[in-house]
Amino acid sequence: MAAPKLPPLPAGKGVWDDHAISRRGFLEAILGVLAAIGALLVAVPGVRFLIGNSLESSATKWVELGKVADLPTAAVTQVNYSTRATDAWREVTQRGTVYVSSADGGATFTALDGTCTHLGCIVQWNEGEGNFICPCHSGRFTRAGEVISGPPPHRMRQLAVKVQNGTLLAEI
Amino acid sequence: MNRIFQWIDERTGLSGPVRDFLNYPVPKYVHRNFLYTLGGMTLISFLIQVVTGILLAFYYDPSTEGAYNSVDYISYQLPLGWLVRGLHHYGSSAMVILVSLHMLRTYYFSAYKKPRELNWLTGVLLFFLVLSFGFTGYLLPWDQKGYWATKVGTEIAGSVPLIGGFLLRIMRGGANLGQATLTRFYAGHILLLPASVAVLIVAHIFQLRFHGMAPAITEKAKAQSKTFVPFFPHWAITDTAVGLGLLALLVFMTWANHAPLEFPADPTSNSYVPRPEWYFLFYFQLLKYFPGVLEPIATIVIPLFLFGSMVLLPFIDTGEERRPWHKPITTLVSIFYIIVIVVFTILAMAAYA
């Protein structure tokens, strides 16, 4: 591709170096390649740096929900757990809400993550109606966590549970 | 004094471009018409945000453990902290209002038409960047409002089909809302967004100067379109006076009602109803009408359609006609959108009240 002709320099300024100008098209192409390499050298590591560890799956952990003997067996109990956790570079107290219930009088327990599957608000247990309701967009779930109505796309997340030394633990 | 200017000019060559900039001829029909101050007012509100933002950054602590206390300190213990934070708080709303009005003025005067398509596009990008400022800004106090509005806002991005999970994690800097999220939002809010907005504003003003004001649409204005006043001081004084009025209004609003700070973020709160800033309320109301599998319509289809139609507008409406009363389609479409936004905002306010 022929390089576009340069405009003449102002009178008295001087002249273009014709010898150098004859290689202008070649130099422009090389410059383009060098600039593209430079841009990629900045952009690729830059994007990787920005993504950082965002996509890493966080390890699950077991948190204590309370002594089995203390948990009501007939009702749905809201448990706000707190546990030490690493948040990026910071050691923090991670807190969350779990709803614990038992369908067989305390022999086994079900733990539901209190986070609404719609947009992440914490649902409330409505004892009168026997269902969970989300204060944000009125999504409703059954006691077992199935969607009844509203915008939630799927059921509440059921957490694995185990009893250890008389304490109920859930895997978050 | 003259010798100093001369000395500087000989070494910088700035006097020519500066003189050209200041002597720019502004058509008489534009001068002293309030509708034409909206762009300048948006710029002034941006400058207010820059100045107050820089001041706030001297005290703000961008950590999940310190953010709330630092904002509380700024608001209640720091001399004039209430004023600086209040100006920043109300200034953000002013910027959203002004940029919207500026766009509406451009829309109704058909100022997006050839050859000003790129100026419209930089304006559309600026509009979305202003909204991004709002979204990244209200997380920073790490109070209930910021925490929950951001949680819901990032979940909305997370519900986008196919790439939602990726988007959510990129926005949060991980699976959960935490320190990485706050740092990301802070860096975006104080570095990336201001730099992007500044570059686009320069491009926007450069294009405005290159093409000049869009043609007048009324007969009265057309009659004045061949008479000009210089930008400086005639036009600049109008912008400055209205800008001072804006600043006075913001100071008054801050004085009458200090910027709110809710309780510290509590991830276990099950009674807190997240409530975004008023300018996002209509969108939250819209989400309610698309439950379950229909949700992507509200989270991706409608926003993309709106953004796409804004981008394509100057390439679709290519006719010569510029008078809104002779352009029923564009005029009615905009009125429809305005009514929807106003009604949804009122419905959302009523629901939260």
Image (cartoon, coloured by chain):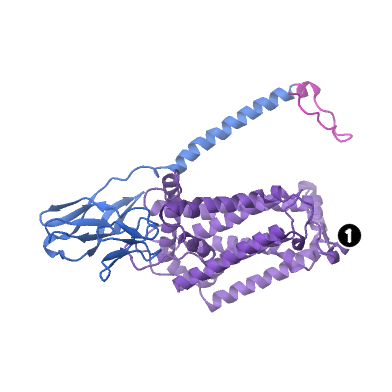
Chain colours: A blue, B purple
Residue at coordinates 44% horizontally, 47% vertically from top-left? B164
Percent x, y of residue B110? 74, 57
From this view, report whether residue B218 is shown above or below residue B184: below
- Mark 1, residues whose alpha carbon is within 10 Å: few (<14), some, or many (≥20)? few
The residue that label 1 is drawn on is B226
Residue A18 colored in magenta in the image: yes
Q: Is residue B259 left or right of residue B30?
A: left
Task: Classify the position of the C terminus of chain B by image quarter.
Answer: bottom left
Which residue is rendered at x = 75% and y = 53% of the image? B208
Q: Identify residue type, mark 1.
A: Lys
Residue at position x 73%, y 66% from top?
A: B35
Magenta region: A1-22
Q: Residue A168's spot in the image, x, y percent?
A: 16, 56
Please provide percent x and percent y for residue B181: 42, 53
Left or right of residue A146: residue A26: right
Q: Quadrant of the N terminus of chain B?
A: bottom right
